[in-house]
Amino acid sequence: MPLLSARPGGDAEEDIAGLEALRAALDARSSEAIAALLVGETAPLLRETALTRLARLDGPFPAEALVLLMRKGDTALRNAAIETLGSLGERAVDALAPLILDAGADTDARIYALTALALVASSRAAKLALDVALNDADVNICAAAVDVVAESGVRAMAAALDKVAARFPERPYLAFAAEAAQHRLG
């Protein structure tokens, strides 16, 4: 049930029930309840409020709930979850690593996780991404990982990017991405 009706003149009782459910979830500090309320929610203000509160909860649960939201089909919700995950700093690395490293997981979900990781800007994020770029079998995952290295990496990682490009010689865009990342790293 959406928290606020997206229709003009929407059902006030439904809106009130949604707001009460959000308040109860926030009061209980339940990331699972907040995430469940976000699915299907279209009101930007309530979505933003719930995501902000979710990100401020302590412990590993907020990041895990955001990873679940990121995997939903709703583009706006996915993008909001990616942005919120990026704001979690080191906690995001711990939450995203299992999905990023799961070669059997959906490729799009892994790329979304790497997109969120690029927003973290930490040496752990860059190291994880470099390991993925050097070892993953999926060229698109490797390209997304190179982007993370470009954002968060250090100069010492630049030489390893040649190895990434060499792994997929038939994919010139990966060589271009690796070269661009090397220039960015200095």
Image (cartoon, grey):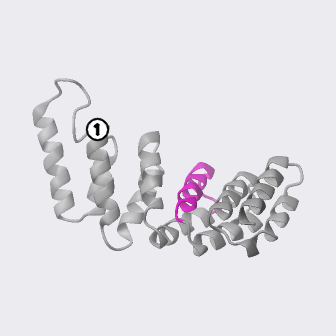
Q: Is residue 6 above or below residue 139?
A: above
Residue ID at (15%, 36%): 14
Quadrant where the image shows the N terminus? top left
**Visible residue check, residue 87:** yes
- Is 144 situated left or right of 99 in this image? right
- The image quadrant that residue 59 belongs to is bottom left
The foreground one among 28 and 114 is 114
Quadrant where the image shows the C terminus? bottom right
Residue ID at (28%, 38%): 43
Residue ID at (47%, 53%): 82
For mark 1, give the secondary structure: loop
Residue ID at (72%, 60%): 184
- Is 19 situated left or right of 123 in this image? left
**Residue lying farthest to the front in this orientation:** 186
Q: Is residue 152 above or below residue 17?
A: below
- Is 136 situated left or right of 82 in this image? right
- The image quadrant that residue 26 belongs to is bottom left
Q: Which residues are magenta?
A: 102-120
The foreground one among 137 and 120 is 120
- Considering the whole magenta stretch, tell me its main secondary structure: helix
- Amino acid carrying mark 1 in the image: Ala
Q: Looking at the picture, how far across and down is residue 98, in whole percent?
A: 55, 68
Q: Is residue 14 magenta?
A: no
Residue indicated by mark 1: 43
Label 1 Cα crowd, 10 Å radius (few <14 / some 14-19 / many 20+): some
**Visible residue check, residue 74:** no
Q: Looking at the picture, how far across and down is residue 111, in whole percent?
A: 61, 53
